[in-house]
Image (spheres, rainbow, N blue to C red):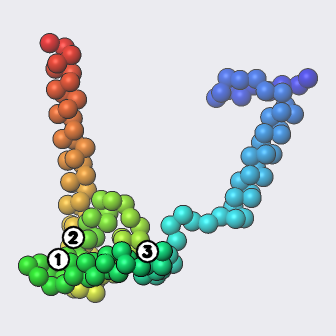
Amino acid sequence: MQSVLIPTLALKFPVNALRRRLLGLFWSLKKYKMAEKKYFDPADLKQFGNITEFQEEMGKDFFNWYNNIFKEGALTQREKALIALAVAHAIQCPYCIDAYSSACLQKGADEEQMMEAVHVAAGIRAGTTLVYSTQMMNHVKKMTM
């Protein structure tokens, strides 16, 4: 029986078994490529209004509330769109990023303002991660006293 050494794994496989595994992987990838569908499809954003289909009352309530919060108030619609864009990045929602990038441009925000809003969101995400380090520091201090 012929075998081959795979240095990175430091394992010995019989050549036929290795060949079968590689061919299996190849065909799996090829099948996946042929049937490839992106998890986030930008076309799905256009179907957002259909969320009432399975629960009409709650869907309508949501849209009424949603439309009200984006009306001009203490904040302008442009400011609200920038906040929504920043939040969309923080929660990593590709649909929201597309929707609020468009909304920001429609409400008069420019690219620099949009990127600044995204940086604010990034700063909050980074700060949130770092503020949890106080828990680690308190635990370590308690354990080493």
* Residue 47 x %, y %: 48, 80
Screen quadrant of the N terminus: top right
Question: Which of pointers 3 and 2 lies earlier in the amino acid sequence?
Answer: 3
Identity of the residue drawn at 80% across and 34% down: 18
Spatial distance from mark 3 to mark 2, Cα to Cα?
28 Å
* Residue 99 x %, y %: 36, 77
Callout 2 environment at 10 Å: few (<14), some (14 to 19), or many (20+)?
A: some
Figure check: 135 above or below 11: below
Residue 109 visible from this viewpoint: no
Identity of the residue drawn at 20% across and 32% down: 135
Question: Which of pointers 3 and 1 lies earlier in the amino acid sequence?
Answer: 3
Screen quadrant of the C terminus: top left
Residue 124 visible from this viewpoint: yes
Q: Label 3 belongs to which residue?
A: 55
* Residue 69 x %, y %: 20, 78
Give the camera-side residue of 23 and 52. 52
Spatial distance from mark 2 to mark 1, Cα to Cα?
6 Å
Figure check: 35 above or below 132: below
Q: Amino acid at mark 3?
A: Gln
Spatial distance from mark 3 to mark 1, Cα to Cα?
31 Å
Q: Label 1 belongs to which residue?
A: 79
Identity of the residue drawn at 78% across and 52% down: 27
Cβ atoms at labels 3 and 1 below 8 Å apart:
no
* Residue 10 x %, y %: 67, 23
**Mark 3 or 2, closer to the camera:** 3
Callout 3 environment at 10 Å: few (<14), some (14 to 19), or many (20+)?
A: few
Q: Label 2 belongs to which residue?
A: 83
* Residue 143, disc: none
